[in-house]
Image (tube, rainbow, N blue to C red):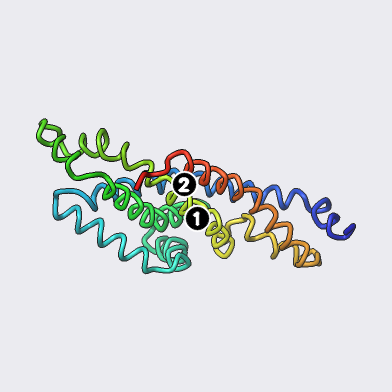
Amino acid sequence: MGEFLRVLTDNHQIFVDGFQTTVQLFLIAAVGSLVLGTLLGAMRVSPVPALRAFGATYVNLIRNTPLTLVFAFLVFAVPKLDVNIDYFNSACIALIAYTSAFICEVVRSGVNTVATGQAEAARALGMTFAQVLTLIVLPQALRAMVPPLMSVLIAMLKNTTIAAGFSVVEAGAIPAYMSERGEPQFAVLTWIVIGFLILILPLVALQRFLERKWAVAR
């Protein structure tokens, strides 16, 4: 037990720095993916065929592409186009691009839970598509959307560890640093698991709270 605690106390700054970067990645990517995912979801239900086609193409392409390849494209391929993006920003863009495809489907599914008569009545009053979506449909769809949105964000938090393979010093990179110091990997990995549990469990609790509060009557 003393050896187990020593791994944390002797290397606490590495753990703090790693998880701090993980939290930064998560917060930036969460906001970005929610915005982009909602826009893509609006495209998927848009009356404009070109927008629907673009949204469907993006979702099908990204969802069927491994996240590691999305990272690799941004880190290795984009610089070949004379576009300079550092590793951290590349990781943020990769997570946003990938996660937004899943959020898009959550938004689309949530919109489909709202009775079509609501939108038809709003259009009959002369409201535009954007007004119908933002003022009528999305507020009603929110109850159905929040629980699966939380699940997507929790998955994204765990996906941040992929950034470690692309020179981003976050929680997933800690084992490599600890290995160089000769620290026992079992203890290192256990502390990383505990760190992620500390980050994820509040999100799970929030998800369950919202599920109970905003349960959709069937």
Q: Is residue 71 above or below residue 125?
A: below
Report x, y in % for residue 139.
32, 36
Q: Residue at x 65, y 53 (%)?
A: 197
Q: Which residue is mark 2?
A: 30
Residue 132, picture quadrant: top left
Q: Which mark is residue 156?
A: 1
Residue 10, compared with residue 185, is above or below; it is: above
In this rendering, would 114 be left or right of 81?
Answer: left
What amino acid type should be assigned to the residue bearing mark 2? Ala
Dot 1: what SS?
A: helix
Q: Nearer the viewer, residue 140 or 24?
A: 140
Q: Nearer the viewer, residue 98 or 206?
A: 206
Q: Quadrant of residue 175?
A: bottom right
Residue furthest top as drawn:
125
Residues marked 2 and 1 touching at CB (< 8 Å): yes
Q: Position of residue 93 (x, y in %)?
A: 43, 53
Q: Quadrant of the N terminus?
A: bottom right
